[in-house]
Amino acid sequence: MIFGVIALVVVLLIVFWWIGTMNSLRRLQVKIKESLSGIDVALTKRYDTLTKMVDVAKSYAKFEKETILGAVKLRQGMSMDERKTAMANMDEARQGLNILAENYPQLHANENYKALQVSIMDVEEHLAASRRAYNANVSSLNQSIVMFPTSLVANSCGITAEAFFEAEDVKRNDVKMDLDI
């Protein structure tokens, strides 16, 4: 009778351990899928942010280039009196722009380039963090399934080692940013 109770307790302990171990392995698999999704989110964020920021930076740079070239063309072929008048008008316009720029500092193209640089660093850090999280979860699962007795549960449930993150060749390249105007 005592032997039967002990055998039942041992069997129940093994069953509970088996279920707990299997649940732990399944949880690790879910974490891996979640972190893989995080990489996709980071890649999408990188693409969306960088393409929008490059477009904004190009627009401001183009505006400034056209403004400077326009001012140079205006000066060509002018008499000295016309130049003095144009310079006075441009000085007034510049003072107005300086006041506007002080009130709205985001109008400076160089600020857009700074914002572009900050955005690039932010999205790259986010992407790197997502990749590290994925690889950490893969490492946890892979370590668990090779250790005895957990390996017995993993093998019986068909849980195999996951591959670490390796970027596709295209994604290994940095985003090409053509800032030519």
Image: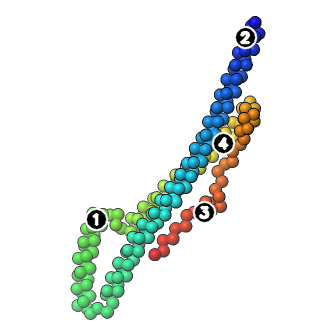
N-term-proximal mark, 3 vs 4: 4
N-term-proximal mark, 3 vs 1: 1
User: Mark 2 and mark 1: span between their CA atoms?
Assistant: 84 Å
Q: Quadrant of residue 149?
A: top right
- What type is the residue that disc 3 sits on? Asn
User: Mark 3 and mark 4: span between their CA atoms?
Assistant: 25 Å
N-term-proximal mark, 2 vs 1: 2
Which of the two discs, 3 and 1, sits closer to the camera? 3
User: Secondary structure under badge 3?
Assistant: loop
- What type is the residue that disc 4 sits on? Ser
User: Mark 4 and mark 1: span between their CA atoms?
Assistant: 52 Å
Tell me what residue is drawn at x 60 percent, y 41 percent.
Answer: 31
Q: Position of residue 52 (x, y in %)?
A: 45, 63
Which of the two discs, 2 and 4, sits closer to the camera? 2
Q: Position of residue 114 (x, y in %)?
A: 42, 63
Location of mark 2 (residue) = 5
Location of mark 4 (residue) = 139
Tell me what residue is drawn at x 35 percent, y 84 percent.
Answer: 72
- What's the mark number on residue 102? 1
Tell me what residue is drawn at x 63 percent, y 38 percent.
Answer: 28
User: Mark 2 and mark 4: span between their CA atoms?
Assistant: 40 Å
